[in-house]
Amino acid sequence: MKRFSASSMRSFLGFSFLSICGVIAHGTPPSSSSWVSSNNRQHPISLDDPSVDDVDILTGSQFHGLKTFGNLPYVKCFSDEEAACKKYDIAILGAPFDTAVTGRPGARFGPTGIRVGSQRLAGFDFYTDEDALHDWATIVDCGDATLTWLDNTVAFKQLDKAHRVISGRPTANDTVAAVPRILMLGGDHSTTLSALRSTYRRWGQVSVIHFDSHIDTWNPDVLGGNISHYAGINHGTFLHIAHEEGLIRNTSIHAGLRAPINKRSDRINDKRCGFSVITARDIDKHGIDWIISTIKARVGDSRVYISVDVDVLDPAFAPGTGTSEPGGWSTRELLTIIDGLRGLSVVGADVVEVSPAYDNSGETTVLAAAQVGLSLVSLMVAKPVRD
Ligand SMILES: *[C@@H]1O[C@H](CO)[C@@H](O)[C@H](O)[C@H]1NC(C)=O
Ligand SMILES: *[C@@H]1O[C@H](CO)[C@@H](O)[C@H](O)[C@H]1NC(C)=O
Ligand SMILES: *[C@@H]1O[C@H](CO)[C@@H](O)[C@H](O)[C@H]1NC(C)=O
């Protein structure tokens, strides 16, 4: 077999490549006149058919390369060398972790699932007529953080570091944004704690807009059985811990709540952690516009972190998750609410608790999660936040 060097391969393929930081980045698309006309087929196509050289193999299909979120470029954000020359304004980061769940496991496969569900997120949004993934901001997929599945204490440190490194890089468009923002793909919900530590480090306290069917402010002494410190840090307590660590403001809000709680103590504790509540059924009583304006009034002009647990959706729309609760919102309702938050200063966001093993063959959950991810990125693009 003949071996090709990289450069002979490039000339063999017949493209002129630009080299950015030593990495092949772009090709020149073929001229349209060189395509083989379908009503003028040549049978058989000869092995050295020159028109093969002119076929575009770089653009034009959702099925190409490796699966990144929305087919965005993959950048090794943890490599100092690569990050120095491939700068970004918004980073997608996977957090494949699910050893702090109380229900069904499997969210460690969530980032991969969401990426698979995101392959058709392309082009101009039907409602806004904007292409958020290809606007002023350079958006890249950093792949997944390295997280051990054997020791949660170590895994949280790894994720803390991943956020710290990625948000500490210089931005691509430094006239608009000084600090890169992160959309995290979970992972069980405990991964949000690392994200909030990171936004606190870069931006100070944030108001959390928490889309979920559960409060997630449970006292670790209550959820986790009070058996050990290790057990207390889990996907139902991370907002309590975020409050204790001083990461979040008392202008935070839950949206879509409906799961059972121990009314007396849990609700008092929830308020103490800085949250007000919009229930799932408030949508029937007050409508979507009320939900949007209530969220906006609550957070005011503070910096905002948006966390979307996919179980805020009804199990009909998102079966692939760890702790399903009937009676949730539809995908369309959730998207309208999130898109209604344009104008808020979103400094970080996530979509979490996606467990593809419980999804269906139509991939309902990962498609919904990917669309939610796009809406979250669109909010960041719509409102740059400086310093
Ligand atoms: C930075 O963003 C601004 C405003 O959105 C845009 O006009 C400008 O072209 C961008 N600059 C670069 C280098 O992308
Ligand atoms: C948790 O355990 C500690 C002792 O290990 C005890 O002091 C505390 O009261 C317990 N909390 C609850 C809520 O049971
Ligand atoms: C938040 O806390 C501050 C001071 O700690 C207080 O003045 C303010 O009223 C609180 N806001 C809410 C919405 O609870």
Image: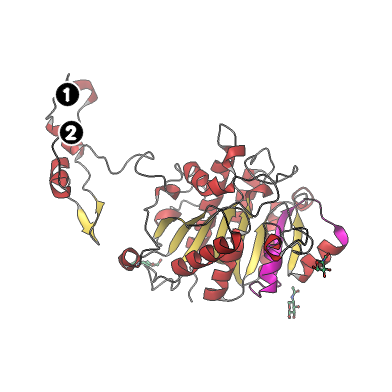
241 with respect to 112 (left or right): right
**Residue 359: percent from left, percent from top:** 60, 37
Q: Is residue 94 left or right of residue 67?
A: right
User: Farthest top residue?
Assistant: 43
Q: Is residue 136 magenta?
A: no
Query: Which structural element holds mark 1?
Result: loop
Q: Quadrant of the rendered structure where residue 56 is? A: top left
Whether residue 191 sits left or right of residue 262 in the image: it is: left
Q: Can I make out residue 6 in this image?
A: yes
Q: Find residue 45 and name its label.
A: 1
- Quick one: label 1, few (<14), some, or many (20+) residues within 10 Å? few
Q: Secondary structure at mark 2?
A: helix
Badge 2: how crowded within 10 Å, few (<14), some, or many (20+)? some
Disc 1/disc 2 C-alpha distance (Å)? 9 Å
Find the magenta span and give its range: 236-264
Seen in the picture, residue 132 relative to 359 is either above or below; the reply is: below
